[in-house]
Each structure stands twice: as structure tokens, then as C-alpha cells.
Amino acid sequence: MNIYVLLKRTFDTEEKITISDARIEEEGAEFIINPYDEYAVEEAINLRDEHGGEVTVVTIGEEESEKQLRTALAMGADKAVLINTEDDLEDGDQYTTVKILEAFFEDKDVDLILAGNVAIDEASGQVGPRLAERLDIPYVTTITAITIDGESVHIERDVEGDVEKVDSSLPLLVTCQQGLNEPRYPSLPGIMKAKKKPLEELELDDLDLDEDDVEPKTKTVDIFLPPEKEAGKVLEGEIDDQVKELVSLLRNEAKVL
């Protein structure tokens, strides 16, 4: 099987993030593989081990993204591809990403593409479905289980706390949800092997694209942190008095009534 994983380098949201001039300051920030993409990498490795073939992880970004690709290789992926846009793109959006990936996959023999359900930095959830539409292959989002039997694929997907069962066929694109698996940590032997695994670097020219082809369709106007939460208020006294005070607070302070 030819299995591909779409991977994104994201900010570690558990670490401190600084915003300046409507941009997140990269200096001093920690970067990781988007956590939902880790589920995709893990599942791709499991499916390869079961059915044979190879796993290729693909990312779009700058030179620094090589670290996250090497981590995926250390987990067990076979090959990696970095589409380096450092010299060609200043900004991009989901349209940009999909346009580049569409060009990359144009001449590829694909059985399965896995991606994270969302990226924790922007959380649009658009790239996977939009790419599948451009490649004219079926897709299933938020999967929590997948079984492949020949050309048939049996899937369970999360639907707001319930489970939906879907049958499809290859080639197919899926986006991965928490609960699909438990991503492994790279082992020391895996880290050493990753240094020798192939990592191909491409630029827009290699995909017959130029800046005008991938110009974003949206513009980020502002980025800001949510307001700090205020301390909660404990209501005291008899139940009837608490209810009256709660209603008053909701009406006069929170203004939700």
C-alpha cells in the first residue's frame, strides 16, 4: 500500500505563546507535530505493518519543519517530503495548502491519505476534505477506527459523542480523531534510523507552481489571546436566596437573560 500522511508543524499550545503585531512570536516558542497528525502517523504505521507497503509523511513549511518530519520517521514512517515555501510564500491559508498538495499528488499512486482532524493552531479542519475533493477521491472525517480488507475499508467515526459506521473503498482520505490509537514515542533505535531515512525537499518550482497560483484567498486581520478568566463566585445562604442571586447575576452582570 502507498500510504501518505499530511503533517503540520504547530505551536505547542501547552507552552507560553507571545503575540506581537497580530502575529505569534516564533522566537522562543516550542514547536511540535500537530497532535492530531500524530494519530495519523501512528495509524499509517500500523496499517503498513499489517498490509505492507510504505508510509510517506508530507509537510509544507520552512527548513525548521525537518525536525518534525524526522520525529515522524523516528516513529516508524519510511520516507518524508518537505515542500519548502520559505523563499516563495510569506502568507498562506487552507487554499494555499491544498493547491500545493494537489500538485504534489498529481503524479502519485495513492492508496490512502491520512491527516489530523484539525490543526490545533487554526482548527479549520478544511485541508483534508478540500484535498480529497480536488483529487476526486472519497473521504471520511473524525475517524476513531479503520479496518482495510482488500479494496474495502470499514470505518468508525466520531459524531458528537456517538459512533457512525461507514464503508468505503480505496483510494481514500481520512482525518484522524483522538481515540483512534495511542501514538508511540520515538525509540532511540528509531531516532538513529531516522537519520538515514530519505527526506526529499521540494520547492514550488518543482511542482510547476508559482506564487500567483497559491495566493491565499483569506487574510488574517488580528490574532489575540482570550481574556484571563476571573475568579468564580460562590453563592451562599438558603437555596431560594441563591437562586434569586444567580438570576440577578445572570441578568445584570453576565447579561445572558
Image: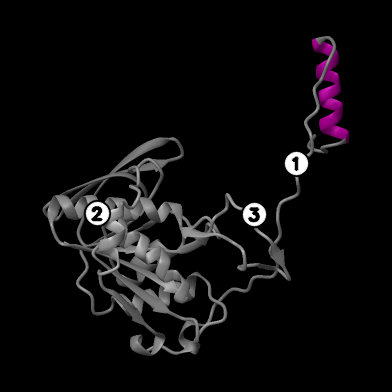
Query: Which label belongs to residue 16?
Result: 3
Q: Quote the CA–CA distance across marks 3 and 1.
A: 16 Å
Q: Are marks 3 and 2 in contact (CB under 8 Å)?
A: no
Query: Residue at point 39% right, 85% down?
Result: 203
Asked whether the residues under the numbered discs 3 and 1 touch, taking CB atoms below 8 Å apart as contact, a structural biologist would say: no
User: For this rendering, which residue is in front, 107 or 79?
Assistant: 79
Spatial CA span between label 3 and label 2: 32 Å
Q: In front: mark 3 or mark 1?
A: 3
Q: Is residue 119 magenta?
A: no
Region rendered in magenta:
239-252
Q: Secondary structure at mark 2?
A: helix
In the depicted structure, whether residue 185 falls above or below residue 24: above
For the residue marked with disc 2, what is the amino acid?
Ile
Disc 1 target residue: 229
Q: Secondary structure at mark 3?
A: loop
Amino acid identity at mark 3: Lys
> In terms of depth relative to the viewer, which is nearer, 95 or 11?
11
Between 4 and 69, the residue placed more toward the observer is 69
- Relative placement, left or right, of 167 versus 24 is left
Residue 15, given in percent of the width and then of the height, sits at 60, 52
Q: Earlier in the sequence, mark 2 or mark 1?
A: 2
Q: On screen, 236 above or below 16?
A: above
The residue carrying pointer 2 sits among few (fewer than 14), some (14 to 19) or many (20 or more) residues within 10 Å by Cα, namely many
User: Label 1: how many residues lie within 10 Å, few (<14), some (14-19) or many (20+)?
Assistant: few
Please name which of the two marks, 3 or 2, marks the residue nearer to the observer: 3
Q: Which percent across, then down, holds residue 23? A: 67, 69
Q: In the rendered view of the protein, which quadrant contains the N terminus?
A: bottom left
Task: Give the residue pinned by disc 2.
Answer: 45
